[in-house]
Amino acid sequence: MVHVEVDIGAGLPQMNVVGLPDGAIKESRDRVRSALKNSGYECPPRRITVNLAPADVKKEGSAYDLPIALGILAATGQLPSQSILDYSILGELSLDGRVKPIRGALPIAAAVRKTGLRGLMIPASNAAEAAVADGIDIIPIESLSEACDFLRGARVIAPLAIAIDALFAEHCRYDVDFHEVRGQDHVKRALEVAAGGGHNVIMVGPPGSGKTMLAKRLPTILPALSLEEAIETTRVHSVTGILQGKALIATRPFRAPHHTISDAGLIGGGSIPKPGEVSLAHHGVLFLDELPEFRKNVLEVLRQPLEELRITISRAVGSITYPANFMLIAAMNP
């Protein structure tokens, strides 16, 4: 949990953000000033210091815009400061004060649930995703003004509640199906055995023989995801920001990276480690088409996830372990 502290002091008009912020957080100074002004609030022409505690942990992303803006309003007396302490608050601000979506809403909501806070104020676009983490009040916020009115008690916003079972049933349909394949009986039999036992498969055949078509339809004959598996898979996709408005992933994922992918793209990485394709395929299928075209070092990094069903990424900022329990399907020409 990151605590956003704001101090208004004497000095030349400027805003300093400390606490190991990345570039997106440093740029929040201009977004916050414009959002406050265009929402009808005063941003004092004084020295503003924003501290993101704990100061020794690297902070990233644009989710700190809304709490910084509300902290400034509380520090200047435009908002009761006590009301802010009951909620965890996240959101990116546009220049006109609208609250834009963030990444990682579901794992954030799961973490906030353990803190004992009253609830989570989050962009309305992320509210359904965050509500999957049951047991916490999810307050959907559309704009900075709406957040201020809610914290003052001038507006009532009912916590969002979703029926997880109904949502799960709604999203557990595939766009393709295994029964659409005609012929290739020996290959279909092999894939059925692989699906039943969770085996890895390599298909060797000439171009146009249906290798990719069969691989895409393999997830449709795998056992249905359980609700726990669906939530775990959704958390990984939420961190990378590729949910595309979905609140829950209820079908087994199918990932087919291009053969030019790097080892970091396959297993995850970056200065602040993000999940790679092996983690995005968690509880699903990882398809490597044109297997001999993949670089040797890329294929060698698959050893740990295939053996341990997880991947550990170590960087200067720390070590992160992501789940990577997938079926590996490979295809190549003779």
Image (cartoon, rainbow, N blue to C red):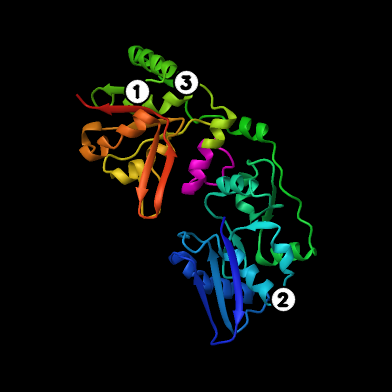
Whether 239 is among the magenta residues is yes
Q: In this rendering, which labeled residue sits more in front, label 2 or label 3?
A: 2
Q: Which residue is mark 1?
A: 200
Q: Which residues are magenta?
A: 233-250
Whether 50 is among the magenta residues is no
Task: Say whether disc 1 or disc 3 marks the residue closer to the N-terminus.
Answer: 1
Gap between marks 1 and 2 measured at Cα: 62 Å
Q: Which residue is mark 3?
A: 221
Q: Quadrant of the C terminus?
A: top left
Considering only vertical position in the picture, is 295 above or below 41? above
Task: Say whether disc 2 or disc 3 marks the residue closer to the N-terminus.
Answer: 2
Q: Where is residue 142 drawn, in percent x and y?
A: 66, 59
Q: In this rendering, which labeled residue sits more in front, label 1 or label 2?
A: 2
Gap between marks 2 and 3 measured at Cα: 60 Å
Q: Where is residue 223 drawn, in percent x and y?
A: 51, 21
Q: Which residue is mark 2?
A: 77
- SS under mark 3: helix
Mark 1, other Cα within 10 Å: few <14 / some 14–19 / many ≥20: some
